[in-house]
Structures are given as structure tokens and as C-alpha cells.
Amino acid sequence: MDRLNGLLRSEQAAELIHDAALRPVEGQYKFFLVQDFHAAHPVFANKLLKTLEEPPDHVVLCLTAAERSQLLPTIVSRCRMIELRPLSPQVIGQALTQQWQAPPEQAALLARLANGRLGWAVEQRERPEGQTERLAHLQALWQMLAADRIERLALAEQLAGNRNSRQIFGMLETWLAWWRDLLLTQAGCADECINVDQLPRLTAQGQQFSPEETQRYLSLLRRVDRYLHHTVNTRMALDVLLLHMPRLGAQAQRLDEM
């Protein structure tokens, strides 16, 4: 079995196509697993179209993606879709405490943050710096809620200049979860929030914006996250994202800092 993951480039597509054309030395089939296809460069995806449409009879191609909507329609039309259901927080939390000896409080938090992904939760359990990164992303968000346009543009420049896609997508994932939680608190569904360790702050911030403002910004976050997985000007996308972020008033800022 060949496995591809990470940021998929055009040269990897050429290598896959070449390997797929060769008959297996042992066994009846060659199995190719291409992970996180939603993060593939469009050139990679387009080069793979012909092989997806008419694969050799000895080849099985398996593509994984976070969401069908993040894939090119031409890719979706050539695949048989298998929807995988996420695990419940209860199942993940129980597994973390019983099999990975996580403390109950940590297990409960990771089970919510995992969004159904047991592997992610286990990785975070074994890599404590992951939660440090999450808190840093949240701190940046809270600072931007109170920042002026100059400070927001400075952060966009810093993020785009580092060219660290992992940092950007990690930040966007954290911010998406936060704004979703804000919308849930505004709807009176705080028990469904992911950031269960930050409920007082979520409640306080949720009172400062209208549900319409929260929904609009959440939709913008999703669009920018989708655009950045494909060909787009990173700096421009981040400028738009930060400049359109709702801003806390002065009184709300003081409450948020308490």
C-alpha cells in the first residue's frame, strides 16, 4: 500500500500515476491511500483525473477528505463516496481515560475538541504542545477582537510572511470552533460547545454580538478556509478575514479581560 498525505503537489501526482501503471509484483491489487485530499494543490487533483476515471484493473485508489464541499466537483464525480460518521465525545472520552490514561478533565476537553476524531485526540494527549498552540490561537483571536485595523493588518502580514500553512490552518480550525461555540451560546445551547474550558468567556462574548454578526463571520471563516486550501492570495484572504472580524466595544473588552 502506498500512502500520500500532507500538501499534495503535482510531482507527487506524476509519481502516483507512474506507479499505478505498473502491475503489482506480489498480490492481485495495488492500493493507494491519498489522505487529506481537500488540501491537495489543484494541479495535483487535475493530473489525477484521468487515473480516477479509468484506473488500471489492478489499482484501488482511496481518497480521504474532511468535507465533500472542499473537493473539486470533477473529483467528486469520479469517486464513490463513503461517508464516515464521527465518534461521539462520550466514546472518545472513555477511550482516552481507559486506554491512554488521560485525566478525566483532559479527556472531556479533548473529546469535545476532537470533533469525532479519536486519532486527533490521542495525538493531542501525547503531544501537550498542541493545547499550548490552541490557547495561543485563541489569545490571538481575543486580541484581534479588540484590535484596530492597523494591528489586524499587521497580524495578517505576519501570518502570510511566515508561509507556515500548518500554523494558518491550525489557527483557522481553532477560530472556526470558537465562532461556532459563540453561535451555540447565543442560541442557548452552551452544553453543545466544544471549548468547554472557556464557557464564561464564550458567554460574555456571545452577549456582545448579534447572532447575525456571528453567523456572517462564521460563514466568512469557512469560505476563507476553503479558499486557502486552493490557489488564492494568502495575504489578501487574511486581510479580508481580519478586517471583517466584529469588534468588541471598550466596555466589553474590559469584561473580557477579567
Image (tube, helix red, strand yellow):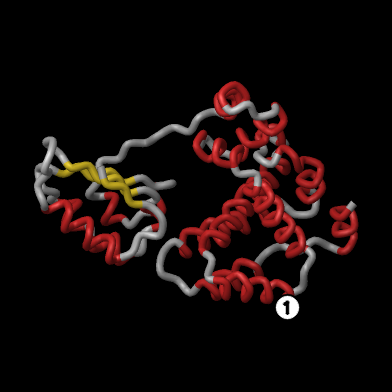
At x 90% / y 51%, what residue is drawn?
Answer: 258
Q: Residue furthest front?
A: 25
* Disc 1: CA contacts within 10 A as few (<14), some (14-19) or many (>=20): few
Q: Is residue 247 left or right of residue 111?
A: right
Q: Amino acid at mark 1?
A: Ile
Q: Residue 39: image x %, image y %?
A: 41, 57
Q: Quadrant of residue 155?
A: bottom right
Q: How many marks?
A: 1
Per the image, the residue denoted by label 1 is: 150
Which sits in the foreground, 111 or 182?
111
At x 72% / y 30%, what residue is drawn?
Answer: 105
Q: Residue 189: image x %, image y %?
A: 69, 35
Q: Is residue 10 left or right of residue 179?
A: left
Please say if 150 is above or below 54.
below
Q: Quadrant of residue 6?
A: bottom left
Determine the secondary structure under disc 1.
helix
Which sits in the foreground, 137 or 212?
137
